Image (cartoon, helix red, strand yellow):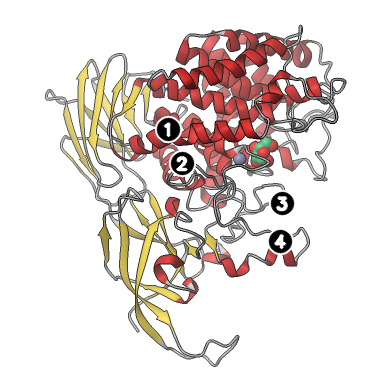
Amino acid sequence: MANYKSVGFEHVRITGGFWKKRQEINRDVTADAVYRRFQDTGRFAALACAWREGMPDRPHYFWDSDVAKWIEGAAYILEAGRDEELERRCDEAIADITAHQDETGYFNSYFLSVAPDARFTDREKHELYCAGHLIEAAVAYAHATDKDALLRAMIRYADYIYRVFYIERSAAFDAGGHPEIELALVRLYDATGERKYLELARHFLDQRGRSGRDGPIAPFANMRYDQSHRPLLEQETPEGHAVRALYIYSAMADIASRMDDPAYFQAASRLFEHIVARRMYITGATGSTHIGEAFTVDYHLPNRTAYAETCASIALALFARRMMETRADAVYADTVERVMYNGALAGVSLDGASFFYENPLEIDPAFADVNASTEEKQHMPIMQRKAVFDCSCCPPNIVRFIASIAQSFYTVSEADGTVFVHQYAQSTADLGIGRLTQETDYPADGRITLRIEGGIRRVALRIPLWCRTFTLSVPYKMTDDYVYMDVPESGEIVLDIPMEVQLIEANAAVQNNAWRVAVMRGPVVYCAEGIDNGEKLRSLSLVAGAAFTQEPCELFGLPVLRTRGLRRTGPMGLYARYHREYEEAEITLIPYYAFANRGESEMNVWLHILPSPI
Ligand code: FUB
Ligand code: ZN
């Protein structure tokens, strides 16, 4: 198993184009909006561990993770430029955490104030999950600011966890119900070089699905919910809660690369392949049902009731990023790209101030009352983004994801120093051995000029799997969808990937998408909204072979697409004799990530298609 080292996003400066704008909104609006909502709801106040029965804002057992993800995101923003106010907000929260950490090193605001006698007794109560997010925040904040108070505190906490779970085994469970500590410990190992954190991460992986002590998590009767139904190395299919699954698979990939472990590599590869081949939405979202926020069975990808949690999309990108460190196959970077432009980005409004938790691929306001008409079993996602949720895991995840978007841009082969370029964006990267500048307006346009300086001798560029033809200014060899080449003397390489509009079919086994297509322009999935196309999107049909025009759109950042299609007319009773009555209709499509930004409206990604004009 070859190793490829990721180039940290802090070495990459995004200097223009699509992601620069999104990063500015993330910094100027989203980070602030999430901070204020967390203030309003008592999440920051809870860190003082002063809540007592009868007071308002009773802490929830994973509020610490919300704050921690926010601090981590803030730290990533600070990497790009110091900001006194942002730092003050972080320092204030950190001061509360360090002041109330107990003498053992333990910190959890819920348990320290609400349930002081129940520490490490309930595997579902997210203590290790919160600890993991705090550790990630600590590593990130120390790196960005050189202030290590939180890092020192979290090292004490990690040492305590090591003692309780590895040495003494004195907790009431062996593997936490919500993974996260595992990949955080790998990060702590990377930051400190302390091997015991890597061993502890592996220990948690090895324990999952083996221990007789770890029972099912209510209300789920089986152990699949938290991936504890069998040892991880024996798991064949992605199961259970999607975020939990993708976090634990991310840690498996980490152990594969850090410990050069073929067994974890094979298991992680198998699970990854299964997800992208059978259980992933075209947007990179996962989780087909709200019941358990979970994977279901192969090809079950309902559009209207998709759970498709923003965190699960981000988690798939985290998993794919880690797989990029194990093998040079473009499927990983392609998956990151799919998530970046679709499943994750839809989670935040264009103005950066509101969020989706669930990201369905089809909305019809006429069906909103289904929730009220049934009991518990059915579930329609909300149709407009909200500023905050009771369970607000997604908004801070967006903050950290967008601020660190460049984490998946480059890896370097440890064997021969080849620099892999996985993502395209106007940017400059300082890779130690040299500098690599990308001049491009990707994905508005597919022309990328690379300027390479210093000691970089060989590069490999990803040819996206959606791309049918490309041109390259220098000779190359292609393997697993990377083109490999020596850097020419001029240092300049030009890659041209046409940003074609393509119609995509789903496997016939995906029930809801039979006889329908999705429209993609490069990596971006498009959708139709009622606001542009009138009522009853389901009466519209694309026509195979019809041309698309593209119109620039400032609001969306990428062009709007238009094509001539058809609309069903004639009798519209509940049932009518089959008739073929259609009228011509212009169909307008917008990037999926931009849906629900202009008021409540129908929306549909998968559109009917007729083979020819009628
Ligand atoms: O349990 C913590 C987070 O809340 C999960 O990762 C999300 O899926 C939501 O359930
Ligand atoms: Zn979430």
SS at mark 2 in the image: loop
SS at mark 4 in the image: loop
Residue corresponding to mark 3: 291
Kind of residue indicated by mark 3: Ile
Q: Is mark 2 within 8 Å of ligand 2?
A: no
Which numbered disc, 4 or 1, marks the residue closer to the eye?
Answer: 1
Q: Callout 4 environment at 10 Å: few (<14), some (14 to 19), or many (20+)? A: some
Give the alpha-carbon distance from disc 3 to disc 4, as whole Å. Answer: 9 Å
Residue corresponding to mark 4: 378
Relative to 299, 131 lies left or right: right
Kind of residue indicated by mark 4: Gln
Which badge, 3 or 1, is on the more N-terminal residue?
A: 1
Give the alpha-carbon distance from disc 3 to disc 2, as whole Å. Answer: 28 Å
Which quarter is ligand 2 in? top right
Residue corresponding to mark 2: 352
Kind of residue indicated by mark 1: Asp
Which badge, 1 or 2, is on the more N-terminal residue?
A: 1
Q: Quadrant of residue 98?
A: top right
Residue at far bottom of view: 577
Give the alpha-carbon distance from disc 1 to disc 2, as whole Å. Answer: 9 Å
Residue drawn at point x = 29 percent, y = 71 percent: 546
Which numbered disc, 3 or 1, marks the residue closer to the eye?
Answer: 1
SS at mark 3 in the image: loop
**Proximity of marks 1 and 2: CB atoms separated by less than 8 Å:** yes
Residue corresponding to mark 1: 28
